[in-house]
Image (spheres, rainbow, N blue to C red):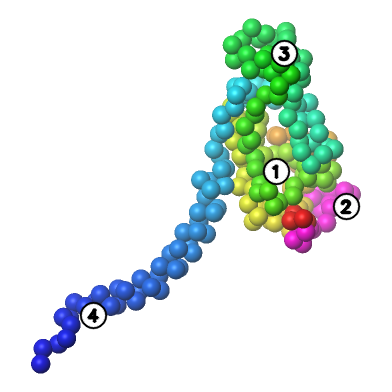
Amino acid sequence: MPPLFPKWTNNLARLSLAALVLAPAAALGFSWIWVRSPLRTGQDQPITQPVQFDHRHHVVDVGIDCRYCHQTVETSSSAGMPPAALCMNCHSQIWNKSPKLEPVRQAFFTGQPIPWNRVNRVPDFVYFNHSIHLAKGVGCVTCHGRIDEMAEVAQGEPLTMEFCLGCHRHPEPELRPKEYLTDMSWKPVEERTLLGARLAEEYQVHSRTSCTTCHR
């Protein structure tokens, strides 16, 4: 009596069984890679703004401190965005006829805010407070990267839960003296671990990993 199925169906059955086992693992692996990829997190992807604002010029060449424009960063959960009137402190005299600054002049005279496009974003269910991080000695560069080297600002770090927890578990390596919070190029003059331990004690920094720290 001839076999009910041809021999090649044995290989097909083996491949089918292998696919049933490997497909979930492949899907899990793809998801693990995808949620950490820059395409998903938005890291290193420049965001076009309504006004061409070059941080390299304003920070490095002119020497403007982060807190001049982001005035609530030390007192509020939000760092704040500069109103057009703040920009006009300089640009009423400098480049005051430049076509590139027309959105700034229009916002100033109409009283409407400049429609900046958000660069750094965490999910709505995540609570983040800028002021407490600066109060504990965490500099801007830790989360935002080298803004002073960006012609067009991009998200400098992945800002994933894994990224945040890494710092919350071991904050010492990211701590710096408060007078250097906005200094993007600051380098410690003493061993980083010893400095971090000393600053953690001085600023009363404690590891925070409970769910309610960020999810409230």
Which tag is nearer the camera, tag 3 or tag 2?
Answer: 3
Kind of element beneath mark 1 = helix
Which comes sooner in the sequence, label 1 or label 2? 1
Which tag is nearer the camera, tag 3 or tag 4?
Answer: 3
Quadrant where the C terminus is found in the figure: bottom right
Q: Which residue is mark 4?
A: 10
Question: Where is residue 73 drawn, in percent x and y?
Answer: 79, 36
Q: Amino acid at mark 4?
A: Asn
Q: Which mark is residue 109?
A: 3
Which tag is nearer the camera, tag 4 or tag 2?
Answer: 4
Which comes sooner in the sequence, label 3 or label 2? 3
* Badge 2: residue crowd in 10 Å (few <14, some 14–19, many ≥20): few
Quadrant where the N terminus is found in the figure: bottom left
* Marks 3 and 4, how far apart at CA: 78 Å
Kind of element beneath mark 4 = helix
Q: Residue furthest left?
A: 1
Q: Are marks 1 and 2 in contact (CB under 8 Å)?
A: no
Question: Where is residue 61 drawn, in percent x and y?
Answer: 68, 20
Which comes sooner in the sequence, label 3 or label 4? 4
Q: Which residue is mark 2?
A: 204
Which comes sooner in the sequence, label 1 or label 4? 4
Which image quadrant is residue 165 in? bottom right
What residue span does the magenta drawing correspond to? 194-212
* Marks 3 and 2, how far apart at CA: 46 Å
Q: Which residue is mark 1?
A: 142
Q: Are marks 4 and 2 in contact (CB under 8 Å)?
A: no
* Marks 1 and 2, how far apart at CA: 19 Å
Q: Amino acid at mark 1?
A: Thr
Q: Amino acid at mark 3?
A: Phe
